Image: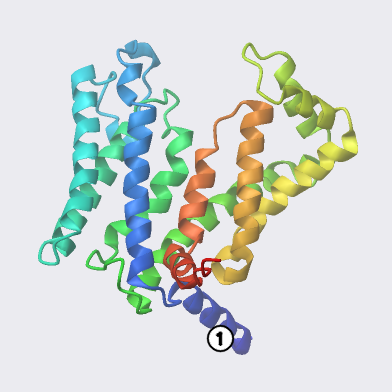
Amino acid sequence: MSGLLTVVRRTVHDAFFRPETPARLVVLQGGFMAFFAARILVEPAHRLTPQPPGLFRPVPMIELLDRMPPKGVVIAGEIIVLLAVAAWFRVGRSPEWRARGRRIAYVVAWVVFLLLATLPASRGKIWHRDLLLIWGSAPLLFAPTDGSWRDRRTTRRAGFAVNSSIAFLSVAYFCTGFQKLKASGLEWIFSDNLQWALYWGRVRGDPPPWRELAFFIADRPWLSQLSAAFIVAFEVGFILVLFFPKTRPAFIVAAWMFHVGTYLMLGLDYWFYAFVVTLVLVDWPRIAERVRRQPVPAPA
């Protein structure tokens, strides 16, 4: 028994403290900052103001509010996030101010973005589209911010921050799939559950883009069950990316298939999750190195 515990402890330790380059951590931090700005520019929260007080059910962190904040306050919060994002990229050019400036900018952007993400939903929860973005970026609040794109030395210091972000994503997906099995068991896969979800497009006021494909799958029970099995296997199996890095490319492809398919066949907008998964799981500096080392073909 002690031998098994030793193996488990060593596996978990190696998963979290696997060395990574500061360059990858910089890409991860900068990518999340860019995503904060993109979410605000594409779907600004101030469009939802004003909201009737009776529809406002705040999450615990803003439960002191009895209604949606004024539009001017929400716009001010969006401007703060955008300025913090710009400051993060600007101070990164100065080795003297890089560490402290980036940390302050990242914390300000994350906290204000979190508050903004609590406003659109009136169901007492953070807006579902932003959940993976918020919690995937949360570990980087405590990550070192003194790295640079050119620093390719692998360190456990940078590795812990990168792997903690991967762990948050892994647990989020795993819990989603586990909850399906906990609530319905294997019936979630082998029943007509997914069939009726796909048929939902027939009664929607705004039909999804690939409604006919959804009906094609729903009309064939074996294909619906196969799709349901893929969904559960993808979500429960996502925990593997933390312990087995070689599985990450497969789960990136599966994430794009799952989230883009969900949007095209059900009209549910989770496709931004695929961008977060790709940002976190891909070692972008390593890819850049491989591209740079490719020989340039000689002119004919």
Mark 1: amino acid: Thr
Position of the N terminus by quadrant: bottom right
Residue 118 location (% of width, % of height)? 35, 32
Q: Where is 106 relative to 100, above or below?
A: above
Q: Where is 94 relative to 122, above or below?
A: below
Image quadrant in which you'd find residue 100: bottom left
Determine whether, in the image, residue 223 is placed left or right of residue 290: right
Q: Where is 165 relative to 220, above or below?
A: below
Query: From where the camera sits, is residue 70 visible?
Result: no
Q: Residue at x 34, y 41 (%)?
A: 36
Query: From where the camera sits, is residue 206 visible?
Result: yes
Residue 189 location (% of width, % of height)? 79, 43
Between 191 and 198, the one lying in front of the other is: 198
Image quadrant in which you'd find residue 19: bottom left
Q: Where is 205 relative to 269, above or below?
A: above
Residue 202 location (% of width, % of height)? 74, 15
Q: How is the image coloured?
A: rainbow
Rate crowding at label 1 as few (under 14), some (14 to 19) or many (20 or more) other CA atoms within 10 Å: few
Residue 293 location (% of width, % of height)? 47, 73
Between 226 and 11, the one lying in front of the other is: 226
Q: Residue at x 66, y 17 (%)?
A: 207
Determine whether, in the image, residue 228 is placed left or right of residue 260: right
Q: Residue furthest left?
A: 96
The secondary element bearing badge 1 is classed as helix
Q: Which residue is mark 1?
A: 6
Position of the C terminus by quadrant: bottom right
Q: Residue furthest front?
A: 300
Between 258 and 67, the one lying in front of the other is: 258
Image quadrant in which you'd find residue 46: top left
Q: Residue at x 52, y 70 (%)?
A: 298
